[in-house]
Image: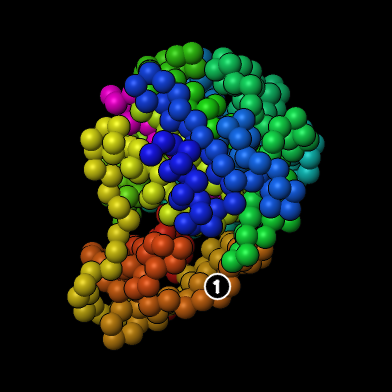
Amino acid sequence: MDLRDRLREAMSKHDVPGASVAVWRDGELHEAADGVVNKDTGVRATTDSVFQVGSSTKVWTAALVMQLVEEGLVGLDDPVGDHLPDFAHGAVTVRQLLVHSAGFDGDLFEDTGRGDDCLDRYLAYLGGAGAVHAPGEIFSYCNAGYCVLGALVARLRGGTWEQAVREHLLRPLGATHAVLLGEESVYFRASVGHVGPDNAVYSSWIPPRSNAPAGATMSLALRELVAFGRALAAGGAPLLSPESVAAMLTPQIDVPGGGGWSPGSWGLGVSLFDWGAYGHDGNTPGQSTFWRIVPGADLVIAMTGNGGSFSGLVDDVAVPVIEEATGLTVPRPSVPPAEPAAVDGTPYAGAYRGPQYGYEVAAVPDGLDVTLLPGPLMESMGATRTTRRYVHLGGESFIAAEPQDGHHDVVTFVLRDGRAAFLHNGRAVARVRA
């Protein structure tokens, strides 16, 4: 079965309106796309279509920071306040921002306008960001931290983040199909997100420009993401030195509950997978991206979809491509044990709150009942208050007994003095009461 046939079959199975995939394998680029970029218009998806790549953008922002390090303009262990004196959390270091351990609320998507000063205004807004944990204490995915890194790049380059991306990354790569500002999308077949059970077109395509360095706005034809991955795999040229790439790929911090299918650790902006790959996934409302580089195998794959069950698309398209090309066995997402071990849920019970959502956790005889309390952003993407049963997976990790979108969510609790201080699902969500 060729790549397009495999993609089309998986899209039909998992109700994905439009998708694209690009694979660099054995010295050749292979591309396929199918479906539509917008159900309302019926415009067909092609390999030239640009899809929002979400947080995959963070690796581009990290590369810009590493260029500044190479030029001696900033040090990884510099307090950020040395370069951004108007940043309220200035004692946090550049490294801590890169590895998601800065400690302040990360899911803050404030729209500070469309002007070139939007990142400066966002820095001022972060003066009210709450502390979740001490800097450097724990990995907790932090979108806001990458907005700060974008502001750092813009300040030291004397322009905007978008100008830095174009001059220092896209142009050296020879990229031609890239969108950084919403108005640029008129030049391309631009995908929109589809949300909810009916795959309705998401009502707000242009996210806040202030969140661009974290992944809000960048849209690419996937060959451009593959080209960036190839540059990293080749030691960085023409973007970075081999020493900078090696630093980015060196584990800096472990992820609680990570490993297997999920990243086990984080480098400087890069997700590191125990089975031998690195990369970064991305999500915007209704659009998802999967991006992996397998060192030593001459393989880079990027895939994106604009609705439906993207996880199913990854299972049926991306994973087989990787395994066929490399001979590796890619770990599959965890499933509940056939006979879950009994565990005392008392240390985990309580309320946990983050800026975009919260959880209520109750101990029950065979595990935990975990109630998701979505905030306005999650509700706009179709999330509702739901209670799900979780059973013990191992250690301090629990897994949803029933699948959602084909997979079982896992949460890990971080204990302090025998009681959970955080519920961790990639982000550390602080406990607010027992």
Which class describes the residues within 10 Å of circle 1: few (<14), some (14-19), or many (20+)? many
Residue under the image location 35 percent in, 38 percent down:
321
Above-or-below relation of 206 to 46: below
Looking at the picture, tell me which residue is in the foreground, 400 or 403: 403
Where is residue 250? Give x, y as percent.
32, 31
As drawn, the residue found furthest toward the bottom would be: 365
Does 292 appear in magenta?
Answer: yes
Looking at the picture, tell me which residue is in the foreground, 174 or 141: 174
Where is residue 396? Give x, y as percent.
28, 65
Main secondary structure of the magenta stretch: strand
Above-or-below relation of 416 to 127: below
Where is residue 204? Give x, y as percent.
73, 53
Q: Determine the image quadrant of residue 266.
A: top left
The kind of residue on which mark 1 rests is Leu
Above-or-below relation of 298 to 370: above
Residue 93 visible (yes or no): no
Where is residue 207? Give x, y as percent.
70, 47
Residue pointed to by mark 1: 373
Residue under the image location 23 percent in, 77 percent down:
343
Q: Determine the image quadrant of residue 19.
A: top right
Residue under the image location 33 percent in, 31 percent down:
294
Residue 44 visible (yes or no): yes
Does 403 appear in magenta?
Answer: no
Magenta stretch in the rendered image:
287-298
Disc 1 on helix, strand or loop?
strand
Residue under the image location 67 percent in, 60 percent down:
200
Looking at the picture, tell me which residue is in the foreground, 29 or 152: 29
Describe the colour scheme in one phrase.
rainbow
